[in-house]
C-alpha cells in the first residue's frame, strides 16, 4: 500500500486506517481509493477487529477527489473508469467506521467522512462541497447524504456556493458527533470506538445495518427490517451472555458468536 497506512491492532478490537498522501492534502486518487477499499474489506473480514477509525492528518482529512487526475477526462472516460463504484464497496463495510477529521474535509473528503458511521471532528475541521467552484458538482453522495444530514437549506447553500462550514457549525447542523481541540480528536475517536468495541459485534453490525436502512426504506419496511434483525440476534451466544450478565449483575463478555 502506498497511500494507506493500516494499524489492525491500534487498540483492543480497534483498527486505525490513515489516508497518507499528505503533500496533496490526501486528494483521493484512484489508487488511494482502491487501497482504502481493500484495507476496509480485509479489516471487515478480520474477527479481531470490531471498530475501524478512519483518519487523515492534522491539516487534511481529504481535500477531495484528485482534480489533477480527473481534469483531462471525457465523460466516456468517467463512465468507463466509474471511480465512484469503489465507494459503493466501502459503504458495504459491516463494521462501524468512525471518521476522525481534522483540517480539510472537502468534496470527496466530506463525502468519505459522511460514508462513515460517525464523525469526530477537531476544532480545525472544515467541511465543504466546493466542486461547484471547479465547474462540476458533488458526485459521491454530497447532494444526497449532506442533504439528509444537515437539511435542504444548508446543503443547498453549501453545494451551490462551495463555501466551507466550521467544525462548530457542522456540530450545530448535526453533521458530526462531537468537536474537540485538535490535539484530542484521535483520542476522542478512540474513546468512542472503545465504547462500541466492548459491545456484541454481531449486535453492533446488525444495529448499524438497521440504522442505515432508515435512509433507504419507507418507515413500515424499515420497522419490519429492524424487527427481523432484533429477533435474529436471539440466535447469538452474545444475546444469552448479555441478558444473563444483566440478571446476574455482572459485566458481559461478548465473543461475537
Ligand atoms: N486534487 C488534487 N490535488 C489537490 C487537491 C485535490 N482535490 N487539493 C489539494 N491538492 C494539492 C494542491 O494542488 C497542492 O499541490 P502542489 O503543492 O503540487 O501545488 C497541494 O495539494 C496543497 O494544496 P494548496 O497549495 O492548494 O493548499 P492551500 O492550503 O492553499 O489550500 C485547499 C487548501 C483550500 C484545500 C485547496 O487545496 C483546494 O481548494 N483544494 C481543492 C478542493 C476541492 O475542490 N475539492 C473537490 C474536488 S472534486 C470532488 O471531490 C468530486 C467528488 O464529488 C468526489
Image: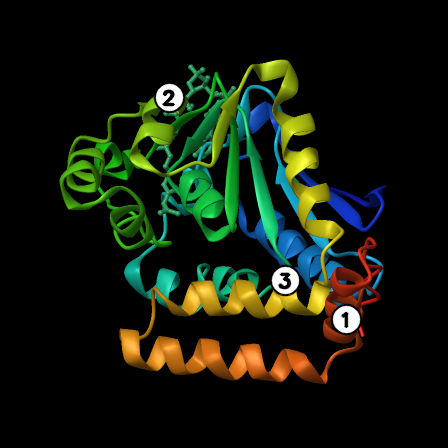
Query: Foreground: 124 or 234?
Result: 234
Whether residue 156 sits left or right of residue 137 in the image: it is: left
Its colouring scheme is rainbow
Occupied quadrant, residue 22: top right
Q: Residue at x 30, y 25 (%)?
A: 164
Occupied quadrant, residue 166: top left
Say above or below: 244 vs 120. below
Q: Residue at x 29, y 80 (%)?
A: 220
Query: Can residue 232 be seen in the rendering of this structure?
Result: yes
Say above or below: 162 vs 58. below
Q: Residue at x 69, y 34 (%)?
A: 191
Structural distance between the alpha carbons of marks 1 and 3: 11 Å
Query: Can residue 94 be seen in the rendering of this structure?
Result: no
Expressed as whole percent of the image width and height from the top left, the position of residue 159 reads 21, 39
> Mark 3 — residue?
204
Dot 1: within a 10 Å radius of its alpha carbon, few (fewer than 14), some, or many (20 or more) residues?
Answer: many
Look at the numbered disc 2 and give the secondary structure of its residue: helix
Q: Nearer the viewer, mark 3 or mark 2?
A: 3
> Mark 1 — residue?
238
Structural distance between the alpha carbons of marks 3 and 2: 28 Å
Query: Foreground: 100 or 131?
Result: 100
Query: Foreground: 174 or 86?
Result: 174
Look at the numbered disc 3 and give the secondary structure of its residue: helix
Expressed as whole percent of the image width and height from the top left, the position of residue 113 reads 48, 43
Q: Which numbered disc covers residue 168?
A: 2
Badge 3 or badge 2: first in the primary sequence: 2
Expressed as whole percent of the image width and height from the top left, the position of residue 137 reads 24, 46
Amino acid at each position: 500500500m502506498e497511500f494507506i497506512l493500516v494499524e489492525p491492532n491500534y487498540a483492543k478490537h480497534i483498527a486505525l486506517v490513515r489516508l497518507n498522501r499528505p503533500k496533496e492534502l490526501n486528494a483521493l486518487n484512484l489508487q488511494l481509493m482502491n487501497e482504502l477499499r481493500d484495507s476496509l474489506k480485509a479489516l471487515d473480514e478480520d474477527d479481531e477487529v470490531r471498530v475501524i477509525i478512519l483518519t487523515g492528518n492534522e491539516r487534511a482529512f481529504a481535500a477531495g477527489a484528485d482534480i489533477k487526475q480527473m481534469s483531462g477526462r471525457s465523460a466516456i472516460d468517467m463512465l468507463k473508469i466509474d471511480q465512484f463504484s469503489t465507494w459503493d464497496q466501502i459503504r458495504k463495510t459491516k463494521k462501524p467506521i468512525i471518521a476522525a477529521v481534522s483540517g480539510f474535509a472537502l468534496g470527496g473528503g466530506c463525502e468519505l467522512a459522511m460514508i462513515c458511521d460517525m464523525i469526530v471532528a477537531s476544532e480545525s475541521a472544515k467541511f465543504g462541497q466546493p466542486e461547484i467552484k471547479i465547474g462540476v458538482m458533488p458526485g459521491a453522495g454530497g447532494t444526497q447524504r449532506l442533504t439528509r444530514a444537515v437539511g435542504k437549506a444548508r446543503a443547498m447553500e453549501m453545494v451551490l456556493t462551495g463555501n466551507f462550514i466550521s467544525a462548530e457549525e457542522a456540530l450545530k447542523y448535526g453533521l458530526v458527533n462531537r468537536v474537540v481541540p485538535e490535539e484530542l480528536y484521535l483520542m476522542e475517536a478512540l474513546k468512542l470506538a472503545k465504547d462500541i468495541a466492548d459491545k456484541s459485534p454481531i449486535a453492533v453490525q446488525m444495529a448499524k445495518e438497521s440504522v442505515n436502512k432508515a435512509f433507504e426504506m419507507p418507515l413500515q419496511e424499515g420497522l419490519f427490517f429492524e424487527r427481523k434483525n432484533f429477533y435474529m440476534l436471539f440466535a447469538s451466544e452474545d444475546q444469552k451472555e448479555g441478558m444473563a450478565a444483566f440478571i446476574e449483575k455482572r459485566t458481559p463478555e461478548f465473543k461475537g458468536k
